[in-house]
Image: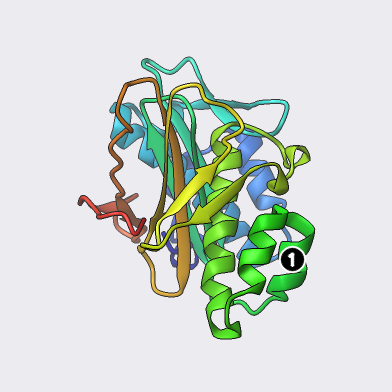
Amino acid sequence: MASDEIHCGAKQPNWVSLLPTGERERVLRQLAPEDKQQALATRVLIRAVISAYLGENPGDWRFDASPTGKPFLIDAPEPVAFNLSHSGNLVACAISGEQGIGVDIEDGRVERNFLALARRFFAPQEYTELASLPAAAQADYFYHLWILKESCLKARGWGLANGLDSYRFQRDSHGKYHLSAPPDTSGQWQHQLLAEQPGYQIAISQRSTHQRPPDMCVETYRMDSERLLTLWRGQHSPHL
């Protein structure tokens, strides 16, 4: 969802009014207009997505956070897990009936010192593999690893203290990524790259207690000035 398509101004009073007093005050305390938009988009989106999933009023949900900062729903009528990520002017949301889901989105057009970041944050084997690639291929590989590792970490509810170098992803000869020596073996884990928005890289990690990896569905939401959300539903083939 593009966060710059919504605003905190008078044209969208219903969006702000969806939030309880504490959340509303935190949004309005943001000084920069773009920070207000990002905070509002994030909070409204998760309420709307959960309501679409569970069929309740978006304004009724109450949230808390784990010691590592991962938000969760209080008094949900049925099991539900969710995760949020934002980059640039986009906000991504993942939701599941299985406990354990993480999503990460990054603007892949941002130039960074990929080798320096990989040396600092990635596992040694990942850095070596990245450094062996031609310079033109390093950006995509770096972002693929970064978002897969971030979504994996978030799905498990860990803080950054666990370190992105404590586990690694490896790309096979077919271009698919696999988690090598996973940090835990409980349940079945699925990690996918998604091609949803031009220029952006998105990854989702999800745990399932069933024998086979869980199915994933991506839904695209867009804010408009007439309704809270206009929803386009559809199954999307994974990029991974």
Q: Is residue 57 visible?
A: yes
The percent coordinates of residue 201 (x first, y second) are: 47, 64
Horizontal side of 154 relative to 55 (left or right) equals right
Q: Quadrant of the N terminus?
A: bottom left
Whether 60 is drawn above or below 11: the answer is above
Question: What residue sits 76% from the left and 63% below the top?
Answer: 119
Question: What residue sits 64% from the left and 58% below the top?
Answer: 126
Question: What residue sits 55% from the left and 51% below the top?
Answer: 169
Whether 139 is drawn above or below 78: the answer is below
* Residue 67 occupies quadrant: top right
Horizontal side of 106 relative to 68 (left or right) equals left
The percent coordinates of residue 39 (x first, y second) are: 59, 52
Residue marked by disc 1: 117
Counting every numbered tag in the picture gives: 1
Of residues 183 and 16, which is closer to you in this image?
183
Of residues 113 and 95, which is closer to you in this image?
113
